[in-house]
Amino acid sequence: MPIAASDEAEVIDGIFDVMMTIGTGLFLLVQGILLYCMVRFRRRQGDTTDGPPIEGNVPLEILWTAIPAVVVFILAIYSFEVYNTMGGLDPHAAHDVGLHAHHSAPMDQKNMLALDLSSKDLAYGLGVPSESEDQVDLKVKVNAMQYAWIFNYPQGGIVTGELHVPVGKTVELEMEANDVIHAFWLPEFRIKQDVIPGRVTELVFTPNKVGQYPIVCAELCGAYHGGMKTVLYVQSPEDYQQWLKDNTVEKSESTETQKVASASPETEFLLPHVKSLGLLPELEQLHLEH
Ligand SMILES: [Cu+2]
């Protein structure tokens, strides 16, 4: 397994360990009995008789039905508990999310209607568990498109192709796709969520180790699906503040020169997409005025 770099990863690894232990135990038990029987009941030299005609054994059949049934029942309760602990039953209502308002790309009537209707529905994904003390410290909007991830920070007008988050803080991603279904997958955090056009999904997680982790698209989304990956930087609070400061768009700067944060050659190509999708609120305003 890759390292467990979030609080959620530890919960998931807990259930994985339990399943692995049960599976290994059953494997050894079954193979052990098999090997024992091969030796104990082997044909002896000179024995040409038939074996006893056994046509079934009710107690034995009850036993080997009951054991898996109990195992499955325990795992069902345990996994439901894990899902609940991770906030699977507590996603926010999509109408708080407000992602829909930012669409300025040309869109036909049918799509418009679909967006309107979906805004009344619940978001899917992982929220903050209602009984937990945690609060969301940082919200980031995520747009998925063939074949890139775009992250939109509420503070500082930051739009970036890489995700930066501070360690130990609870992060909420509000995700929507611009074209087809994608899936946001963080292997080191053990979480994955579909990202769907016209519908907001969310993920809440708390990174607990500073480092760089891959963000991978886990839903076959087209010819270059395999290249749809980027990096999650989990930073110390100081480094994160510094990154925010370095990338905050100056208020005085003209909207035309607004930059994609940390515009490396790799992310620079996103700029025209970001503009045409109206991801920058100021830009949206500009369109309305004309
Ligand atoms: Cu994709």
Image (cartoon, helix red, strand yellow):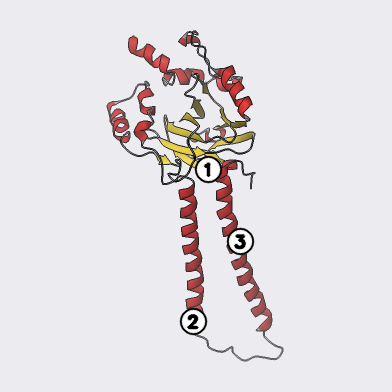
Q: Nearer the viewer, mark 2 or mark 3?
A: 3
> Image quarter for residue 208?
top right
Callout 2, which amino acid? Pro
Image coordinates of residue 52 in percent, x first then y, are: 56, 89
User: Which of 127 and 160 lies nearest the eye of the viewer?
Assistant: 127
- CA neighbours of label 2 inside 10 A, class few (<14), some (14 to 19), many (20+): few
Image coordinates of residue 260 in percent, x first then y, are: 53, 18
Residue 102 shows in this picture: yes
* Residue at image location 60% in from the left, 41% down from the top: 188
Image coordinates of residue 187 in percent, x first then y, are: 58, 42
Residue 224, which numbered label?
A: none
* Residue at image location 60% in from the left, 31% down from the top: 233
Q: Residue under label 3, please give it.
A: 21
Q: Is residue 120 left or right of residue 224?
A: left
- CA neighbours of label 3 inside 10 A, class few (<14), some (14 to 19), many (20+): few
* Residue at image location 44% in from the left, 33% down from the top: 175
Give above or below for 53 relative to 29: below
- CA neighbours of label 1 inside 10 A, class few (<14), some (14 to 19), many (20+): some
Callout 1, which amino acid? Ile
User: In whole angstroms, how far apart are the C-alphas of marks 3 and 1?
Assistant: 22 Å
Callout 3, which amino acid? Thr
Q: Residue under label 1, please give it.
A: 191
Label 1 sits on a secondary structure element that is strand
- Does the Cβ of the disc 2 residue fall within 8 Å of ligand 1? no
Give above or below for 227 relative to 264: below
Q: State the quadrant of the C terminus.
A: top left
Q: Earlier in the sequence, mark 3 or mark 1?
A: 3
Residue 145 shows in this picture: no
Q: Residue under label 2, please give it.
A: 59
Identify the residue at the far front of this view: 133
